[in-house]
Image (tube, rainbow, N blue to C red):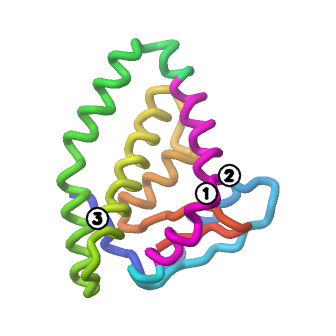
Amino acid sequence: MTAWFSRVGLPLSPAEEVAIDELARIVAQPLHVAVTALVSWPEAAAFVRSVLHDATWWDQEEEEREALWERAAEHRSEADLLQHLETLNRDLEAEVHDAALAAAATAGVVDQAIAVEAAGMALLAAHQSALASMAGAGPEHRFVRKFALFASGRWPLGYHSARFVIF
């Protein structure tokens, strides 16, 4: 069983700090990146709303996703790739959604929209990580590292304004 959202808002462990620093260096190279750890669901919701107009992180990830898709399609049919990702979604969707709702409810969050957003981002990270694997990328790939943070209970919100934000 994965620890979805079980560590959001808690202080970062030394191992998490190392993992986040490594991921931040990958996504923002060669820039120095400050890490900002959010401590509450309302703070995460406010951050998500504040970056809706900034597509930089999304554009970077989409470019990488497209490159991985092309590499993976060299070895598998597109139908096989889609089937694999659909199966992954079917296997994870309820678990991730329920975990996000439970974590938010435990924290006293009434508006479930942020939990739904968190679950959607975790599922996207699962897809990205699976695609990286199918494309032959190793465990050091940014999508694999991002998914590992989700799977360990965090919510990596991404790189925005020279800082990597994690909840």
For mark 1, does the 10 Å Cα neighbourhood hold few (<14), some (14 to 19), or many (20 or more) residues? many
Mark 3 or mark 1, earlier in chain:
3
Within-10-Å neighbours for mark 2: few <14, some 14–19, many 20+? some
Residue 22 showing in the rendered view: no
The residue that disc 2 covers is: 26
Task: Give yes or no for contact between labels 3 and 1 (Cβ–Cβ under 8 Å).
Answer: no
The answer to whether mark 3 and mark 2 are in CB contact below 8 A is no
The numbered dot on residue 3 is 3
Above or below, 18 against 55 in this view is below
Q: CA distance from mark 3 to mark 2?
A: 24 Å
* Residue at numbered disc 1: 23
Q: Determine the residue located farthest toward the right in the rendered image.
A: 30
Q: CA distance from mark 3 to mark 1?
A: 20 Å
Task: Residue type at mark 3: give it.
Answer: Ala
Residue at image point 65% right, 60% down = 24
**Place of residue 127 in the rendered image (x, y in percent of width and height, measured from the top left):** 39, 40
The reply, left or right, for residue 158 in relation to residue 44 is right
* Quarter-of-image position of residue 150: bottom left
* Residue 154 visible here: yes
Q: Amino acid at mark 1?
A: Leu
Q: Quadrant of the N terminus?
A: bottom left
In the image, residue 80 sits, relative to residue 49, either above or below, namely above
Under circle 2, the secondary element is helix
Magenta stretch, residue numbers: 44-69
Q: Secondary structure at mark 3?
A: loop
The reply to whether callout 2 and callout 1 are in contact (CB within 8 Å) is yes
Which x, y percent locates residue 164? 63, 67
Give the percent coordinates (x, y) of residue 26. 68, 52
Relative side of 8 to 34, left or right: left
- Position of 126 relative to 70 (above/below): below
Tell which circle, 3 or 2, labels the residue nearer the N-terminal end. 3
Where is residue 69? Give x, y as percent: 51, 26
